[in-house]
Image (spheres, grey):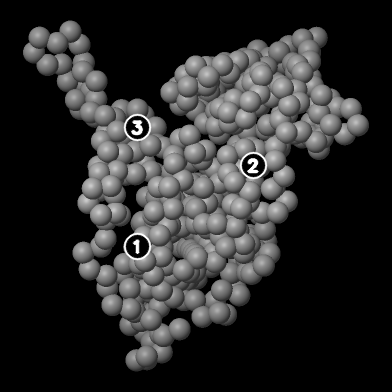
């Protein structure tokens, strides 16, 4: 609740389904607002932490089973798996590619949406439970899934997310000053000690920032640019506002902070001098027939090109899965943009003992979806481990 109450789009989930919002009370002029579930969740979590002695502890932790699980990724799905399996008596080690644990909760969500102290307290609670964290370790490069099994783990959960930013594939994308959303957000929101050495140089965003995209990540980027002191921040989106995928609340916040929105506009190329970005060439669009998503396709308007000054441009057009893990794991079936195929009942992949959930299965999605995946996957992993324990000779399951 401490995270979902702050990060989830309650208006389209729990609050959107709240029956109070549909009820008409005697004397009322119309339907009433729904119960503010998100705010209540955040309040209850804060009350527990501040006045009742910290994070809720499990009533009873199961005795050790001797079974060990490796969790790849410390985002919402991975942390949910780690917590649930540790409570059930299994030994859990979480591998994280970044210098500190937290995944998207640390490296994808700006502090102005969720204070990092919440994450730190949760991680401290997990460590107290017995979860071990190994950072600066890339599975698929530094270690493989087969290495984890060889090290004595009985099951592996892949919860590394979908963190590879989509590319525009237009000229000038390699100019200095053109960033993928993740790098821009982490360098713009986190202290150097939380970052890998290659990202520790302070951002020099200049005067004019252009962000390309239409989801909540693009809103995070424009609002970060405002906080970094940009004189102008412009969001460029190729459809109309009605087709935007992100939350209306996020767009309202961005407008209140001075962000300019440029709809029915798409980038053509990035223009620079001496390897440094100077402007973005844009083109007006109009809406054509619907595409496979059901939204009307943007169609270029001939002769409508123009340029917009830009010292920094941020590409925030979505994320893909990590191809490296798939390539390094023989027999692991994938689909789409490097997403992992699982049995939706058991969360098991095509590799025995390897489970997966979260964005690396679903594509970029909500925090609550990843948390739910993690909890359900933990139950399936627990059942799998107990079958192994039942089949093993006495004492043979110990790592």
Q: Of callouts 1 and 2, which one flags the residue occurring earlier in the amino acid sequence?
A: 1
SS at mark 3? helix
Which of 227 and 394 lies nearest the eye of the viewer? 227
Q: Of callouts 3 and 2, which one flags the residue occurring earlier in the amino acid sequence?
A: 3
Residue drawn at x 37%, y 50% as measured from the top left: 372
Image coordinates for residue 72, horizontal then vertical, percent: 53, 62
Instruction: Give the label on residue 329, or none.
Output: none
Q: Quadrant of the C terminus?
A: bottom left
Which of 93 and 369 lies nearest the eye of the viewer? 93
Q: Which residue position holds label 3? A: 10
SS at mark 2? helix
Q: Residues within 10 Å of mark 1 (few under 14, many from 20)?
A: some
Image coordinates for residue 129, horizontal then vertical, percent: 35, 67
Q: Quadrant of residue 237?
A: top right
Instruction: Give the label on residue 84, or none.
Output: 1
Instruction: Give the label on residue 187, or none.
Output: 2
SS at mark 1? helix
Residue drawn at x 44%, y 39% as measured from the top left: 114
């Amino acid at each position: 609740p401490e995270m979902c109450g702050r990060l989830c789009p309650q208006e389209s989930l729990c609050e959107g389904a709240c029956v109070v919002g549909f009820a008409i009370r005697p004397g009322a002029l119309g339907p009433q607002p729904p119960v503010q579930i998100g705010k209540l969740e955040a309040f209850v979590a804060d009350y527990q932490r501040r006045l009742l002695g910290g994070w809720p502890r499990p009533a009873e932790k199961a005795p050790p089973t001797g079974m060990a699980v490796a969790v790849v990724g410390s985002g919402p799905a991975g942390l949910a798996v780690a917590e649930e399996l540790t409570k059930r008596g299994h030994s859990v080690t979480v591998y994280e590619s970044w210098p500190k644990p937290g995944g998207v909760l640390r490296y994808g969500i700006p502090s102005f949406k969720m204070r990092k102290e919440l994450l730190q307290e949760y991680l401290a609670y997990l460590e107290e439970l017995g979860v071990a964290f190994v950072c600066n370790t890339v599975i698929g490069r530094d270690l493989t899934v087969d290495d984890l099994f060889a090290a004595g783990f009985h099951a592996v959960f892949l919860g590394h997310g979908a963190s590879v930013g989509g590319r525009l594939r237009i000229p000038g994308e390699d100019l200095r000053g053109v960033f993928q959303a993740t790098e821009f957000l982490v360098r713009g929101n986190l202290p150097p000690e939380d970052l890998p050495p290659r990202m520790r140089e302070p951002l020099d965003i200049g005067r004019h920032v252009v962000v390309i995209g239409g989801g909540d990540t693009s809103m995070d980027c424009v609002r970060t640019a405002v906080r970094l002191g940009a004189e102008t921040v412009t969001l460029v989106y190729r459809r109309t506002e009605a087709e935007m995928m992100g939350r209306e609340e996020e767009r309202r916040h961005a407008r209140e902070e001075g962000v300019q929105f440029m709809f029915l506009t798409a980038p053509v190329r990035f223009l620079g001098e001496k390897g440094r970005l100077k402007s973005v060439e844009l083109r007006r669009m109009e809406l054509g027939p619907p595409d496979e998503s059901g939204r009307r396709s943007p169609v270029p308007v001939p002769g409508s090109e123009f340029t917009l000054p830009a010292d920094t441009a941020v590409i925030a057009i979505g994320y893909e899965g990590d191809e490296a893990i798939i390539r390094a794991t023989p027999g692991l079936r994938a689909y789409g943009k490097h997403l992992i195929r699982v049995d939706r009942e058991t969360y098991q992949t095509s590799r025995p003992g390897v489970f997966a959930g979260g964005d690396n299965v679903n594509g970029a999605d909500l925090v609550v979806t990843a948390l739910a995946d993690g909890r359900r996957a933990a139950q399936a992993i627990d059942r799998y481990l107990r079958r192994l324990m039942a089949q093993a000779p006495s004492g043979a399951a110990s790592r």
